Amino acid sequence: MLEVGYVIIIFISGILSGILNIMAGGGSTITLGVMILMGMDASVANGTNRIGLMVESTSGVLAFRSEKYSAFGESFKLSLFTLPGAILGAVFAIRISNEQFQQILAVIMILILITLFIPKTNKNKTLSLEKKGKKYLIYPAMVLIGFYGGFIQVGIGFLLMGALRHLLNLDLVRVNMHKVFIVFVYTIPLLFVFGLTGNINWFYAFFLACGYAVGAWWSAKISIAKGEKAIKVILAIAILIMATKFLLSGTSVFI
């Protein structure tokens, strides 16, 4: 009975995480926290969570494509720059504690929240970005974000949304469209890193993945139907909750 209860809890946490990850970010805090509280080792919880993220991002990509939102060429180009950092980050994740990152992550979330609500000008937005060279900062940003994603993953959505929105000046629906594709691509090599080192619980990973898929599909549909306003509200709430949690917590970033 206890095993059945754990499966149900993991499935529900996957749904909640999938919804939050697609529309904002930080959903991995839910799933990682649940698995660690169940007694799972942090590195195993980290690896197991990657299976859910793979299914979630696949579901999200398909959902956006079904709504005629896709730009695979551009998404794939951005994804390639995350791969070196992601692989290196995963190797560190297996060997190094992640506790130091919780205060840094809280600060990043608050900064993204502030910049998200700064009004955008309507004059020559694309030209202005190209003249200042900001557009090309997206590539080194993707390398660094890839490292963080491979290392911890918690809150990666906030970092991706901040980079894509403010360096490429995209609306939030298209930001989410690229975000799910980027996570899909860099998660592929991470499965090999965590899997080959025995840091994946395949039994729980199956049920977690099912929950992620359901949550991601619902979330992508809501994201497109409601547009930027709904995403901003959910993003703001998620950031405030997570930032407060990280700032007040004296334990691991995962809990």
Image: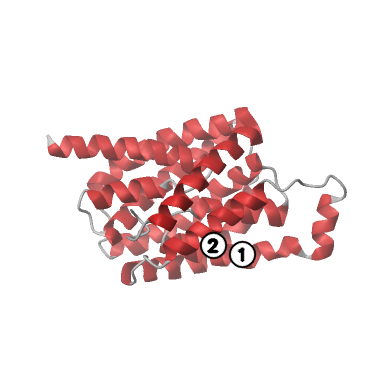
Disc 2 marks which amino acid? Ile
Q: How is the image coloured?
A: secondary structure
Residue at image location 51% in from the left, 39% down from the top: 60
Residue at the right extreme, as displayed: 123
Residue 158 falls left or right of residue 102: right
Residue at image location 56% in from the left, 43% down from the top: 236
Q: Residue 73 carries which label?
A: none
The residue beneath circle 2 is 145
Near mark 2 (Cα within 10 A), the count class, few <14, some 14-19 or many ≥20, is many
Residue at the front extreme, as displayed: 248
Quote the CA–CA distance across marks 2 and 1: 6 Å
Query: Is the Cβ of the residue at disc 2 closer than 8 Å to that at disc 1?
Result: yes
* Residue 150 position (above or below residue 184): below
Residue at image location 39% in from the left, 49% down from the top: 29
Residue 39, given in percent of the width and then of the height, sits at 20, 53
Residue 6 falls left or right of residue 23: left
Near mark 1 (Cα within 10 A), the count class, few <14, some 14-19 or many ≥20, is some
Q: Is mark 1 on a helix, strand or loop?
A: helix
Residue 35, given in percent of the width and then of the height, sits at 27, 49
**Nearer to the camera, 118 or 254:** 118
**Nearer to the camera, 213 or 243:** 243
* Residue 153 position (above or below residue 62): below
The residue beneath circle 1 is 141
Residue 34, given in percent of the width and then of the height, sits at 29, 46
Residue 118 falls left or right of residue 126: left
Q: In which quarter of the image is residue 102?
A: bottom left
* Residue 106 position (above or below residue 176): below
Q: Is residue 75 visible?
A: no
Q: What element carries label 2?
A: helix
